[in-house]
Image: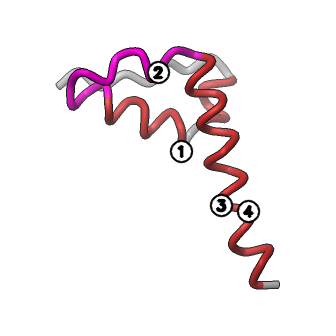
Amino acid sequence: MIRRLISLPLIWVAIGLIVAATHQFFDHLGSIGGVLSAILAVLLWPLVLLGVHIAIGI
């Protein structure tokens, strides 16, 4: 049971990293806004797959 609780968040983040990378969110890490956008894209990857563009302009 504990292994499943640990592995689900890791799988979520791994998929998020792949989705964010394929949608070029890691290309603009030169600013705080780019970093925050990439973090949100990793955590909210289902929205990215649905076409929502997550961009924070700071």
Q: Residue at x 37, y 22 (%)?
A: 55
Mark pair 1, 4: CA separation: 13 Å
Q: Are marks 2 and 3 in contact (CB under 8 Å)?
A: no
Question: Which mark is nearer the camera, 2 or 1?
Answer: 2
SS of the residue under disc 2: helix
- Which color scheme is applied? secondary structure
Which dot marks residue 8? 4
Let me know if residue 20 is in the magenta part: no
Label 1, on which residue?
Answer: 43
| Residue contact at pointers 3 and 1, CB within 8 angstroms | no
Instruction: From the top left corner, tell me how far across and down residue 38 is, in percent.
Output: 42, 31
Contact? badges 3 and 4 (CB < 8 Å)? yes
Q: Is 30 or 49 nearer to us in this picture?
A: 30
Quick one: label 2 or label 4, which is nearer the N terminus?
4
Give the residue at x 73% y 62%.
8
In the image, residue 2 above or below residue 34: below
For the residue pair 51 and 23, the one nearer the viewer reads as 23
Q: Residue furthest bottom?
A: 1
* Disc 2 target residue: 25
Q: Earlier in the sequence, mark 3 or mark 1?
A: 3
Q: What is the spatial separation of the Cα atoms under label 2 and label 4, in whole angstroms?
A: 23 Å
Point 47% across, 21% down: residue: 25
Question: Which x, y percent locates residue 49?
Answer: 68, 24
Inspect the image, locate mark 4, and give the three-letter code of the amino acid beneath it. Leu
The amino acid sitting under disc 3 is Pro
On the image, numbered disc 3 is attached to which residue? 9
The structure residue drawn at horizontal position 66% and vertical position 58%, both measured from the top left corner, is: 10
Q: Mark 3 or mark 2, which is nearer the start of the sequence?
A: 3
